[in-house]
Image (tube, rainbow, N blue to C red):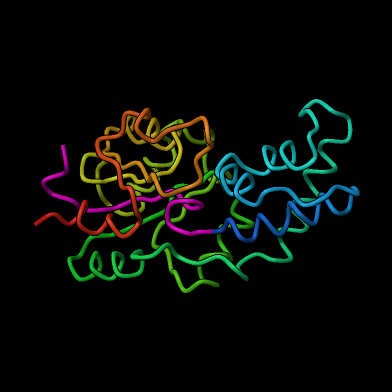
Amino acid sequence: MMPRDLQAVLFDLDGTLVDTAAEFVVVVQKLRAEHGLPEMDPQRIRASVSNGARALVKLGLDIDFEAPEFESKRLRLLELYTEVLGTEATPYPGITELLDELAERGISWGVATNKPRAYAEPLLPRIGLYCPSLVCPDDVKDRKPHPESLYLNCRELGCTPHQAIYVGDHVRDIEAGKRAGMYTIAAAYGYIEPDDSAESWGADIIAPRSEDLINLILTD
């Protein structure tokens, strides 16, 4: 049930609050070029962004996680990402308006992401977002789908999980939100693999477009 006394809206970062895929497309294509590989379908890269750097390396170079050279390739991908961080990322359509309306109503917002702080923290101000509560895997013992990140957001924002909503574009986001006791919204507009479906995650409601969030959250 939607919180009657809504105090905070929490978001996943990549694929939910911010569209960062264009930067990862550039990075994966550069990594492939360094290995003499042709460019791959950008949509295939976009769909895998929420799975993290390891998944992008596996996808881009078609190598196993256990391969001896895998870690060096992962570090190279992150190095390339640092060079483009914040250059093409943008808040999804309707997000800025939603955050402004939340502020008008005295409702806080925050981010719970599995993106390391070294990348998440500088990204947000570069695209004009100033987050009151940013929780990264560096800040917790257990990353999502464990709910620890969301509990920390709530402590920082001075609310209980039952007074918060969590929005995410991956099944682990919805699992984390449900385990925390939050109302959950599946961002069906995000980075979702072709064999996956937001309808299968068990969220309380689905947002087909980012522009739909403001009406789904502020329903009065």
Image quadrant occupied by the N terminus:
top left
When the figure is inspected, residue 111 is found, relative to residue 62, above or below; the finding is below
Instruction: Please report the residue visible at 20 percent of the width from the left and 65 percent of the height from the top.
Output: 106
Q: How many marks?
A: 0
In the shown orientation, is residue 186 left or right of residue 90? Answer: left
Residue 86's image quarter? bottom right
Q: Main secondary structure of the magenta part?
A: loop
Instruction: Please report the residue visible at 48 percent of the width from the left and 31 percent of the height from the top.
Output: 196
Instruction: Please report the residue visible at 28 percent of the width from the left and 64 percent of the height from the top.
Output: 98
In the shown orientation, is residue 62 left or right of residue 111? Answer: right
Indicate the position of residue 160 as horizontal and vertical percent values: 24, 43
- Of residue 143 and residue 80, the one placed in the foreground of this image is 80
Q: Is residue 191 magenta?
A: no
Residue 157's image quarter? bottom left
- Of residue 168 and residue 190, the one placed in the foreground of this image is 190
Indicate the position of residue 151 as horizontal and vertical percent values: 37, 40
- Of residue 211 and residue 153, the one placed in the foreground of this image is 211
Q: Is residue 18 magenta?
A: yes
Indicate the position of residue 107 as horizontal and vertical percent values: 23, 60
Residue segment shown in magenta: 1-19
Indicate the position of residue 80 as horizontal and vertical percent values: 77, 58
In the shown orientation, is residue 131 left or right of residue 204? Answer: right
Image quadrant occupied by the C terminus:
bottom left
Instruction: Please report the residue visible at 74 percent of the width from the left and 66 percent of the height from the top.
Output: 83
